Amino acid sequence: MSSLWGGRFASGPADAMAALSASTHFDWRLAKHDIAGSRAHARVLNRAGLLTDDELEGMLKALDALEADVVSGAFTPTIADEDVHTALERGLIERAGAGLGGKLRAGRSRNDQVATLFRMWLRDAARRVADGTLDVIDALVAQATTHSTAVMPGRTHLQHAQPVLLAHHLLAHAQSLTRDIERIRDWDARAALSPYGSGALAGSSLGLDPAAVAADLGFDGPVENSIDGTASRDFAAEIAFVLAMLGVNLSRVAEETIIWTTAEFSYAVLDDAWATGSSIMPQKKNPDVAELTRGKSGRLIGNLTGLLATLKAQPLAYNRDLQEDKEPLFDSVEQLELLLPAIAGMIATLTFDTDRMAELAPQGFTLATDIAEWLVREGVPFRIAHEAAGACVRTAESRGVGLDELTDDEFTAIDPHLTPRVRDVLTVTGSIASRDAYGGTAPDRVAEQRDRLVARLTEH
Ligand code: ARG
């Protein structure tokens, strides 16, 4: 085993020890970031007078060659390499010779290395996730624009509540997904500090400049505290939460798509490219994209809670437990990179049956609140107005008709204030147009909301 720590040991590790310890099957993903970190480290060693200019040049050449071989697949870890850092040091020494290659490790530890590389990998991954989320938002906004005046029954408790614009509903999902993108941005500002130079925990005695490495690797600066830099993983837990929240928000879009495409609802039809069939039932068209989204959102929550449990009560500074930090995050990112383009495609190609949604919009007495609020505008106290509107529902329900089908006499019998003018608010479009305060469902307000959202997204 080409170990980084053999000196004080008389024997190599037992097979089961090595098998437990090995992490290259997942941390190999950090190889490119590890090599970038090595370049930056070589430069500060040079600046500190620990590598001559010639040695630096030779080191950088060897790192370039190593990177090319990593990218092409010519260099891969072996079962003897404990982790990505061990494997890449072996690769460097194979290319630069032990004399030069062996100098790179001065003043750094795998503890500060891995904490830095993981931040770098996550910052790149979070940017990709944000881009994928933006595509989902774009699909929602495009549908909202296409259907700018289509109406639907808005629901609470899944029961018909009040009519709303389909665009208003779709943009509600876009709002929460936009916050997910903003959360990624907020997180990045905190994650943008480099632990490189923290060493094993106490910092470096070799005159290396952590700020120079940080700048070289695209960080805003170095961490304040070398113990914290090597021991903390709240940057990982925080982005795991953001990704889980994104999964949960996507699961709500997914759940509604599943419901909307049932025979009972028939609000929408899935495009063939984003649905699957059944091996036995020839008629089936299943919403698997949405179901996998719903399912995987549970997995993302699991990745968050698993990581928090791993971190809980670990004494400072580095403990090997921390090696367990990477797989949950790699998995959450991998799952989202599969999900996001599929959800975007599914939403972009949904065909809405807006006639059916319009037909259902007033059903279930969704205009009852409009009667009560109309009475309030006529000077009736809301408590009495609410009772009167409820009585209208009771009468209409017992006759099996809609609220707009009550007779003038029926209205006045319920409350003398209920003159025929109440019929003005007993249409879906009238009800929707009347909700024209900021953030409401009136068409102009929804169009403004969409424009503000698009503007907010282009700021990013
Ligand atoms: N592979 C380890 C990790 O992912 C880094 C190695 C630190 N090992 C050590 N014995 N200090 O956390």
Image (cartoon, rainbow, N blue to C red):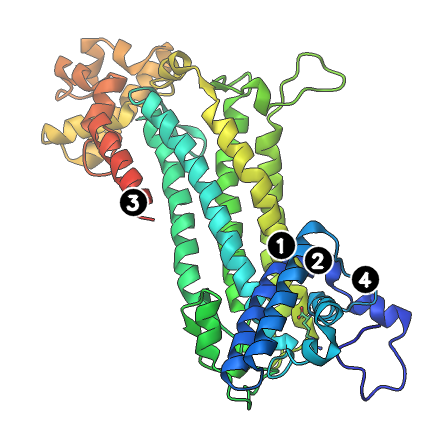
Does 293 appear above or below 35?
Answer: above
Q: Nearer the viewer, residue 402 or 107?
A: 107
The local secondary structure at tag 1 comes to: helix
User: Label 2 amino acid?
Assistant: Phe
The answer to whether mark 3 and mark 2 are in CB contact below 8 A is: no
Query: Which mark is in front, 3 or 2?
Result: 2
User: Label 3 amino acid?
Assistant: Arg
- Is 212 on the left or on the right of 29, as rendered? left
Residue 156 place in picture, x, y as percent: 40, 34
Q: Earlier in the sequence, mark 1 or mark 2?
A: 2
Mark 3 sits on what residue? Answer: 456
Q: Earlier in the sequence, mark 2 or mark 4?
A: 2
Q: Nearer the viewer, residue 375 or 52?
A: 52
User: Label 1 amino acid?
Assistant: Phe
Q: Nearer the viewer, residue 431 or 401?
A: 431
Mark 1 sits on what residue? Answer: 330
Q: Earlier in the sequence, mark 1 or mark 3?
A: 1
- Is 368 on the left or on the right of 242, as rendered? left
Residue 82 place in picture, x, y as percent: 77, 69
- Is 333 on the left or on the right of 174, as rendered? right
Q: Circle 2: is it few (<14), some (14-19), or many (20+) Cα within 10 Å?
A: few
Mark 4 sits on what residue? Answer: 78
User: Label 4 amino acid?
Assistant: Thr
Mark 2 sits on what residue? Answer: 26
The local secondary structure at tag 3 comes to: helix
Mark pair 2, 4: CA separation: 13 Å
